[in-house]
Amino acid sequence: MIFSTPKKFTPATKTVHVSGAKALWFIFKKNDLLVMHNSGTEGALEIPNLTDPSELGISTGPQQFIGYYGDQPCYAAVVSGIPKENDSFIWSGLRALFGRLTDELFSVSGRAYQIADWHRGHQYCGRCGTKNSLQEGERCLVCPSCGQLHYPRVSPAIMVMIQKAEEFLLARSPHFIPGMYSALAGFSEPGETLEETVHREVYEEVGIRVKNIRYFASQPWPFPHSLMIAFHADYASGEINIDPDEIEDANWFNVHNLPERLPGLISISRKLIDATLNELRHH
Ligand SMILES: [Zn+2]
């Protein structure tokens, strides 16, 4: 799965990094990551391997040690000030780096982005406004004044593939690219189990009831900090009645009648749809 933890990556919060040694630097400017051209492979990109970002003429604000890639220490950081342009690197949105970084480093970039974004967004305590400090040995910021702890935010969201015999339900939201349909999805609310989120989201978005909810897989989704948890479910009752604020269209599809476009291979929605198609084709 893209956006999982590569075998080569060991998450850590406490560095034994020796000053002056090289490290992989995941440096963000707003939502863009600094990447360098890979000298060996045409079109391929890589994460800069530096002693310090100042080697590229870049100064950074908050820096976070995130772990080791093989034996290379990895840092997530955010630029401070306006960095000078330089021919040796480019800034790119994460999605556009899929297929240009290795899948492993692409996954670590997603993790680095979530940590950098959390760190820059929690410089001050949200409760009393005092400047936070890092909690030793934990991925956590603590307020020295009121003691409030600030952990990186992870927002669980469900995704569900609803089947009715040989058919399955896909929907499109108004912000999808033309022709694309995907499985239903939505954020869980405080007080809900994930199964309850599935029942509520499905009923709110398309007005039907489901049963037999089965876990499929999960995927961190760093846009900006979701954890997608995907399920299969069976149709129970009702007719499709869409919520026009959320959904532009929803319909029953089958293996011989697919939408014009499906979500990209990067996403768990595509894995969920492909798994359903495989099962139906071999049934
Ligand atoms: Zn506080």
Image (cartoon, rainbow, N blue to C red):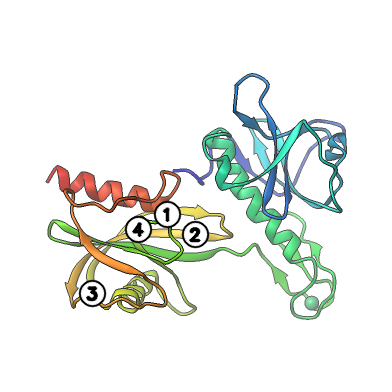
Residue hosting label 3: 240
Task: Specify the label residue 182 is tagged with.
Answer: 4
Describe residue 45's horizontal placement relative to residue 50 as left or right.
Answer: left
**Mark 4, residues whose alpha carbon is within 10 Å: few (<14), some, or many (≥20)?**
many
User: Image check: 196 left or right of 32?
Assistant: left
The alpha-carbon separation of the residues under discs 1 and 3 comes to 27 Å
For the residues labelled 4 and 1, say whether their Cβ atoms are less than 8 Å apart: no
Secondary structure under tag 1 reads strand
| Residue 239 placement, left or right of 170 | left
Q: CA distance from mark 2 to mark 3?
A: 27 Å
Q: Nearer the viewer, mark 1 or mark 3?
A: 3
Coordinates of residue 169 in the picture (x, y in percent): 25, 63
Would the CB of label 2 be found within 8 Å of ligand 1? no
If you read the primary sequence from the N terminus, does the residue marked by circle 1 or circle 2 appear first? 1
Q: Quadrant of residue 150?
A: bottom right
Is the shortest distance between ligand 1 and the CB of mark 4 under 8 Å? Answer: no
- State the CA–CA distance, disc 1 to disc 2: 7 Å
In which quadrant of the rendered view does residue 53 lie? top right
Mark 4 and mark 2 lie on one chain; the one further toward the N terminus is: 4
Whether tag 4 and tag 3 are in contact, CB under 8 A, the answer is no
Element type at marker 4?
loop
In the displayed structure, 59 sits above or below 172; it is above
**Viewer-nearest residue: 215 or 91:** 91
Dots 4, 2 in contact, CB < 8 A = no
* Circle 1 residue: 218
Mark before the other along the chain sequence, 4 or 3 = 4
Residue under pointer 2: 227
At x 75% / y 80%, what residue is drawn?
127
